[in-house]
Image (cartoon, rainbow, N blue to C red):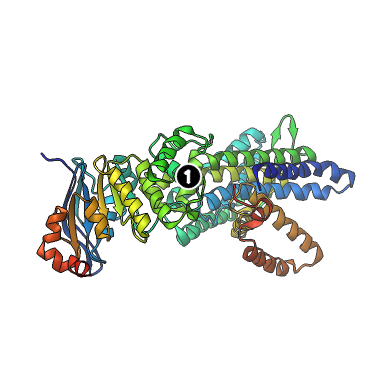
């Protein structure tokens, strides 16, 4: 498939997403607005994970940490009466980047299964930290005191919030595309593909990997800020290890070799989950085998089916 | 005091009980092609890996252009002028031949902490990469993924990536390994065009290639250098014949 057809597929997808609010309004089904908005927020998180997992070969099993940090940055500031959205979201991004810098600086020195376990361990530490802080509701969590305030854009308006999430998604797709094709992106992809060769031609992969880890963390922090505004509730469950696993699954299901793949993965996973859970309470029994089959038969993910060759 | 580009003193490396490099002394002169030969398991690749910085020696020093580089990493050595080709082909299989070489150019052409512009579209990376691919004879294969090239072409690509870093010293680890006669001839021709301009350390099993390319030869047996000399001296050296060449000459 050439780049023109790919652009048409992408444009069609975006047009469908843009049409969701009016259609949901027409059918008087606000539930779908809610569902698609939630999926897009997870798509943003999965997209950020793919930068390090798919392109960088760093299998982080702790990416939900940044969803949590972004959410807490917004929730805690709102708790103390600071509801300026620009300030909240800047903190969400900045704090996520800082934590990613610390976690990355330690874990990128390891590789393989050690990297997976260290990233998991760091995120579990943050999870238990969230549970233990009673001021912010402990393991019960707490209501978001007020949604982020942006002046012109009112997040209490479901449609406005929806389009803001869509705009962030489109922006991140574009940023991700530029990033992986830049000099920087070529280095992290090269280091994943063949580390010995990459060192021999003169690149020390560590600083590039660390920078990618920080960028991915910061992007996911913004997804966390969106998520807490979406749920209007703050809970340590955002950082649960199962959440990290879901994000990984979206990436692998969607396809690691393209920027848009994880977005497809997020939609596929969450839509199937929604459909099955409406049908039976034992939906996980069906979802599990479906996921196994999809990994076995779509080795290059849904993006591989849809777009053909890698970008 | 001399024109040695590389000086190795007392280099020792063991893996458990196996002494892979045993007190190796080696001098490589600026501009020469220095072959290292020896039977299988003599420690040739271990030596190359220590020279390239992929493996740290247990003891000994390595000096390059007068500087002690024993503790430097492979990327740091690359920036001082080392380039390596691997015995087992080591390329980016999913990247095109051009992208493979462009990455090698990029590593030596300013900062790679650039996040926006397309690297593929950079002419400052493309043009040198195309020139090098022409030089090694892959000018017509630039758009193919590395993994789709024939074996011999992949070996040429290895050399192209080494060349693209504009090295002072090339470490070529069995560049004609697994090649047919015609491919071998082409590779020997390519290396002979580099001779003189670059200093080359050549590890090779193919004796015809060694004797046609090398200015000097060192013979490595069980981790020790048993002889160093011109190809003619090595050919007639009794100890070398006994330890190594004997079988080949007889065959």
Q: Is residue A111 left or right of residue A2?
A: left
Query: Residue at image x 51%, y 43%?
Result: A185
Q: Is residue A109 something one can see in this rendering?
A: no
Residue A129 is situated, as x and y percent measured from the top left of the image, at 55, 53
Of the pair B163 and A112, the residue shown nearer to us: B163
Q: Is residue A93 left or right of residue B151?
A: right
Q: Which residue is mark 1?
A: B140
Residue A264 is situated, as x and y percent measured from the top left of the image, at 68, 52
What secondary structure is found at the residue carrying circle 1? loop
Query: Residue at image x 80%, y 62%?
Result: A278
**Which chain is mark 1 on?**
B
Of the pair A17 and B243, the residue shown nearer to us: B243
Which picture quadrant has residue B237? bottom left
Q: Is residue A268 something one can see in this rendering?
A: yes
Which picture quadrant has residue B236? bottom left
Query: Residue at image x 61%, y 34%?
Result: A87
Q: How many marks?
A: 1
Query: Residue at image x 47%, y 51%?
Result: B146
User: Badge 1, how many Cα within 10 Å: few under 14, some, many 20+?
Assistant: few
Residue pushed farthest front?
A: B182
Residue B178 is situated, as x and y percent measured from the top left of the image, at 36, 61
Residue A303 is situated, as x and y percent measured from the top left of the image, at 65, 53
Q: Is residue B213 left or right of residue A58?
A: left
Is A126 placed above or below A229 here?
below
């Amino acid at each position: 498939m050439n780049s023109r057809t790919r652009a048409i597929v992408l444009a069609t997808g975006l047009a469908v997403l843009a049409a969701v609010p009016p259609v949901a309004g027409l059918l008087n089904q606000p539930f779908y607005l809610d569902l698609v908005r939630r999926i897009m927020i997870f798509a943003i998180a999965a997209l950020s994970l793919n930068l390090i997992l798919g392109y960088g070969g760093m299998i982080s099993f702790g990416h939900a940490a940044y969803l949590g940090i972004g959410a807490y940055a917004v929730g805690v500031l709102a708790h103390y009466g600071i509801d300026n959205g620009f300030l909240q979201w800047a903190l969400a991004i900045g704090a996520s980047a800082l934590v990613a810098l610390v976690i990355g600086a330690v874990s990128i020195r390891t590789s393989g299964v050690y990297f997976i376990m260290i990233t998991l361990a760091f995120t579990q530490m943050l999870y238990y930290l969230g549970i233990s802080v009673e001021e912010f509701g402990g393991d019960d969590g707490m209501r978001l005191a007020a949604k982020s305030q942006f002046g012109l854009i009112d997040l209490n308006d479901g449609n406005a919030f929806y389009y803001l999430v869509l705009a962030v998604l489109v922006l991140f797709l574009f940023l991700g595309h530029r990033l992986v094709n830049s000099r920087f992106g070529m280095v992290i992809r090269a280091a994943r593909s063949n580390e010995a060769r990459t060192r021999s031609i003169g690149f020390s992969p560590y600083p590039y990997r660390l920078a990618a880890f920080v960028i991915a963390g910061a992007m996911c922090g913004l997804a966390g800020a969106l998520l807490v505004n979406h749920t209007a509730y703050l809970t340590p469950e955002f950082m649960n290890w199962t959440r990290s696993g879901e994000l990984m699954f979206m990436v692998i299901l969607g396809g690691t070799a393209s920027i848009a793949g994880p977005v497809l993965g997020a939609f596929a996973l969450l839509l199937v989950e929604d459909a099955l859970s409406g049908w039976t309470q034992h939906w996980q029994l069906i979802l599990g085998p479906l996921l196994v089959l999809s990994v076995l038969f779509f080795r290059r993910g849904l993006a591989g089916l849809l777009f053909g060759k890698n970008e | 005091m001399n024109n040695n580009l590389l000086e190795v003193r007392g280099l020792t490396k063991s893996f458990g009980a196996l002494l892979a490099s045993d007190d190796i002394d080696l001098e490589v002169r600026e501009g020469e092609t220095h072959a290292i030969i020896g039977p299988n398991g003599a420690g040739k690749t271990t030596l190359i890996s220590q020279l390239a910085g992929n493996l740290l020696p247990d003891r000994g020093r390595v000096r390059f252009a007068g500087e002690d580089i024993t503790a430097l990493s492979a990327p740091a050595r690359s920036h001082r002028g080392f380039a390596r080709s691997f015995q087992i082909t080591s390329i980016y299989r999913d990247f095109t031949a051009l992208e493979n070489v462009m990455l090698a150019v990029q590593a030596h052409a300013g900062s790679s902490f650039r996040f926006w512009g397309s690297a593929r579209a950079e002419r400052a990376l493309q043009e040198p990469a195309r020139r090098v691919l022409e030089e090694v004879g892959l000018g017509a294969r630039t758009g193919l993924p590395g993994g789709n090239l024939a074996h011999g072409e992949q070996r040429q690509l290895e050399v192209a990536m080494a060349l693209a870093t504009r090295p002072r010293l090339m470490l070529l680890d069995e560049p004609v390994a697994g090649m047919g006669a015609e491919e071998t001839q082409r590779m020997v021709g390519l290396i002979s065009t580099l001779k003189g301009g670059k200093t080359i350390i050549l590890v090779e099993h193919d004796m015809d290639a060694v004797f046609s390319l090398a200015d000097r030869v060192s013979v490595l047996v069980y981790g020790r250098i048993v002889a160093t000399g011109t190809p003619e001296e090595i050919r007639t050296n009794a100890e070398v014949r006994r330890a190594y060449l004997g079988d080949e000459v007889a065959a």
